[in-house]
């Protein structure tokens, strides 16, 4: 009888141990919002909110992981000036090296997924920004890395560089990397306040407007052409009926468009939709940004 009791107790203990082990694994790999905030790392000039994997990228890139790095650059004593990165040489002030072996550049500058942070105060340090003494700037970087690099027990070394030999290095464990379904879920978990603010801004921009006002704006669009520059390369847009055409360096692309409260939605024939911000005042329209 005692033997049977010991066997039963042994089985129960084994099941309990297995259950705990599975729970630990899930906490490391799962969508754990509490861990996302607890993984904060700090140095003199950088507060690292966390590193997150966007699982929606797995289908197109099964051997790679798309990382979002959310951090704040701060300074109490010096002005920190960063370099400008061009489309033909993408990157940002932040680079990462994993396990002291593979090094990666920031891909957010040319990535479609940057739109997740479009309406937030997060910046990508690719445009020669300056962080003045006594201020701070929220930043986001994006890196596509080999999935094998993120195995347990590894170290991610993040290096922030600027002018005048500025360099700040901070380390992060691969075990602390968090996994979420997409970029929106990452922002929602990592910075709920910024997520809610961005949601309100987006709703306002995309609100429908009065048909009479829409006709006035459309008339202005039809009677003019507009342009902007990306890395010194001129981009020109023209509107004709309900279609648009963007021309640059002899090449053209286009599609249909919609006029919203603060943006013009450009629906490209390729399936991509960009937002072109504008202001309409005193019967005249002005572009207030570039499409993204």
Image: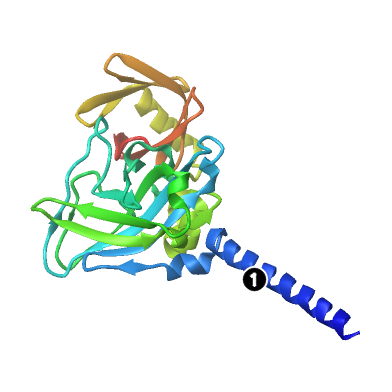
**Which picture quadrant has residue 244?**
top left
Q: Which residue is mark 1?
A: 20
Furthest toward the right, the residue is: 1
Q: Is residue 192 left or right of residue 95?
A: right
Furthest toward the bottom, the residue is: 2
Q: Nearer the viewer, residue 109 or 250?
A: 109
Furthest toward the top, the residue is: 250
| Label 1: element kind | helix
| Residue 204 in sight in this render | no
Q: Position of residue 176 (x, y in %)?
A: 45, 62
Residue at x 25%, y 30% (from the top left corner): 88
Residue at x 71%, y 73% (from the top left corner): 16
Q: Where 133 falls versus 63 (above or below)?
A: below
Q: Position of residue 292 (x, y in %)?
A: 38, 37
- How many neighbours does mark 1 have within 10 angstroms: few (below 14), some (14-19), or many (20 or more)? few
Quarter holding the N terminus is bottom right
Q: Nearer the viewer, residue 81 or 287?
A: 81
Q: Position of residue 153 (x, y in %)?
A: 44, 60
Colouring of the image? rainbow
């Amino acid at each position: 009888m005692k033997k049977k009791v010991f066997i039963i107790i042994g089985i129960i203990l084994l099941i309990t141990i297995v259950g705990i082990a599975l729970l630990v694994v899930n906490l490391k790999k799962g969508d754990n919002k509490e861990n996302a905030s607890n993984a904060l790392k700090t140095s003199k000039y950088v507060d690292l909110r966390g590193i997150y994997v966007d699982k929606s990228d797995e289908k197109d890139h099964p051997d790679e992981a798309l990382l979002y790095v959310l951090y704040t650059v701060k300074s109490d004593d010096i002005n920190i000036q960063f370099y400008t990165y061009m489309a033909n040489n993408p990157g940002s002030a932040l680079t990462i090296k994993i396990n002291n072996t593979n090094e990666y550049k920031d891909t957010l500058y040319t990535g479609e997924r940057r739109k997740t942070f479009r309406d937030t105060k997060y910046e990508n340090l690719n445009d020669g920004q300056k962080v003045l003494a006594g201020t701070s700037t929220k930043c986001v970087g994006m890196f596509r890395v080999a999935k094998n690099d993120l195995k347990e027990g590894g170290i991610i070394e993040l290096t922030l560089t600027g002018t005048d030999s500025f360099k700040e290095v901070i380390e992060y464990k691969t075990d602390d990397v968090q996994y979420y379904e997409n970029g929106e879920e990452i922002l929602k978990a990592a910075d709920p306040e910024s997520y809610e603010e961005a949601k309100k801004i987006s709703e306002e921009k995309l609100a429908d407007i009065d048909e009479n006002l829409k006709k006035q704006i459309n008339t202005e669009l039809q009677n003019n052409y507009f342009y902007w520059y990306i890395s010194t390369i001129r981009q020109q847009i023209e509107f004709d009926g309900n279609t648009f055409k963007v021309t640059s360096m002899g090449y053209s692309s286009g599609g249909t468009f919609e006029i919203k409260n603060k943006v013009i939605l450009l629906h490209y024939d390729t399936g991509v939709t960009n937002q072109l911000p504008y202001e309409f005042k005193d019967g005249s329209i002005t572009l207030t940004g570039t499409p993204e």
